[in-house]
Image: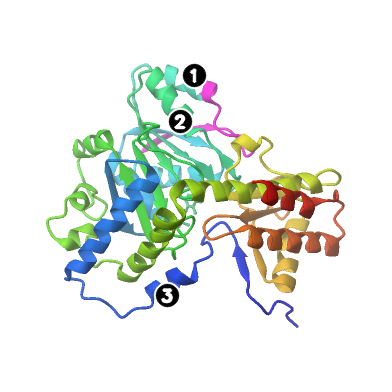
Amino acid sequence: MTKHFGRSYVATPGPSVIPERVLRAMHQPAPNIYSSELEALVESIIVDLKVLVGTKYYSVIYIANGHGAWEAAIANLFAPGDEILTLNTGIFAQGWASCAEAMGIKVHTLDFGLNHPVDLDQFADRIKLDSNKTIKGIIVCQADTSTSVKNDIQGISTVLKTLNHPAILAVDCIASFGCDYFSMDDWDVDVVLSASQKGLMTPPGLAFLSFNERARECARNKQHNSLYWDWERRIFPEEFYFYFCGTAPTHHLYGLREALNMIIHEEGKMEVFKRHKRMARMIWAAIDAWALSGPITINIADPKCRSHAVTVVKVGAPYGSELRHWVEDHTGLTLGIGLGMGTKEDPNSTGIFRIGHMGHVNGNMIMGLLGSIEAGFEHLAIPRGAGAIGAAAKVLATS
Ligand SMILES: *Cc1c(COP(=O)(O)O)cnc(C)c1O
């Protein structure tokens, strides 16, 4: 018999917990899509998205998931035969690269493995090799959700500027948006991708692209083959329906408006980043204590290179999967599966689990999550250090 009656907690790295307020805001009859209120709603959302991404330039909304954002970015920036460089630190950058390849783009790859961020020296060496400047774009994830690594996007941008390389820098912030600090214009990033279902606490279905004048110029100079993805038509829409190239995603917009009220107008963007840092540090403190003896470790060793949105934990096959099943059945907590971390000994990543700590999470939820995991470890008799819950409480009490 199930033992988890009570409020359950889906702590997978997306889709994230949706606040009741966002759900309630969505619970409305269909509006008149020709009304001026809907237009004002979209405009207010775009203003707040730009605040969150840190740009004075442009943001557009697509009805799509993250894969749609990938395709939108490629469709606007590059044409078949163009060459780009992907900086892989997990399977998500690789996924984006595959999307580009399917669209006829020639993709070069620098792979940094599954435990490290982009190495800026290696990146600089690769850029120096491109003396004819044939590489038109760099694609990279700020946080790769499969490894929980966080890349130094400002550092990557600085390498390009220092070496005077004109490649467009396009960053996948889908996991990290509204969780890890980001500042598009200050860091001189040309294109930023995000989506509704992670830090933005809204159901999957909206993808966002933010881009600067340089990226816009790059898109203008290419032959377009998609009306739907074309961002130029969306930034100064001749008619309201141009914003979405068709019917507006009405109820997602209601939900997102409420979520942005919470993020931008109530808690405040910098406080939201601080809260995510606190939650992440609580989780890391607990894992560090568990790691003192036995097999449990955090995938990314250096805390500076870890995302504040997601943490990948190694516990050894098959205990990652067993732990997930146990905590889900006994405590109502759902953890994320291991993704793309397979080894010869553990091809299906069953020794891995992932904790999503993005969006609508607080200290109480993280203490509960860690307590449930502790109980799961106890049930599975996984050897570990003591004091994990106390270590997390200490972070919460002092930060
Ligand atoms: C979730 C995620 C995506 C993909 O989003 P989908 O909505 O599943 O298409 C892309 N990149 C990163 C870094 C993600 O975390």
Q: Position of residue 189 (x, y in %)?
A: 37, 34
Q: Residue furthest bottom?
A: 1
Distance from disc 1 to disc 2, alpha carbons, whole Å, reads 17 Å
Give the crowd class for mark 1: few <14, some 14-19, many >=20 residues within 10 Å: few
Give the crowd class for mark 3: few <14, some 14-19, many >=20 residues within 10 Å: few
For the image shown, how many numbered marks are present on the structure?
3
For the question of whether residue 132 can be seen, the reply is: yes
- Name above or below for residue 8 compared with residue 50: below
Labels 1 and 2 touching (C-beta < 8 A): no
Membership of 111 in magenta stretch: yes
> Which label was assigned to residue 154?
2
**Which corner quadrant of the image does residue 168 belong to?**
top left
**Which corner quadrant of the image does residue 163 belong to?**
top left
Q: Pointer 1: what residue?
A: 125
Between discs 2 and 3, the one toward the N terminus: 3
- Disc 2 is placed on an element classified as helix
Q: Residue at x 69, y 37 (%)?
A: 301
Between discs 3 and 1, the one toward the N terminus: 3
Q: Residue at x 27, y 45 (%)?
A: 58
Q: Nearer the viewer, mark 1 or mark 2?
A: 2
Q: Residue at x 28, y 38 (%)?
A: 212
Q: Is residue 117 left or right of residue 164?
A: right
Q: Which residues are magenta?
A: 105-122
Q: Position of residue 336 (x, y in %)?
A: 63, 59
Between discs 1 and 2, the one toward the N terminus: 1
Labels 3 and 1 touching (C-beta < 8 A): no
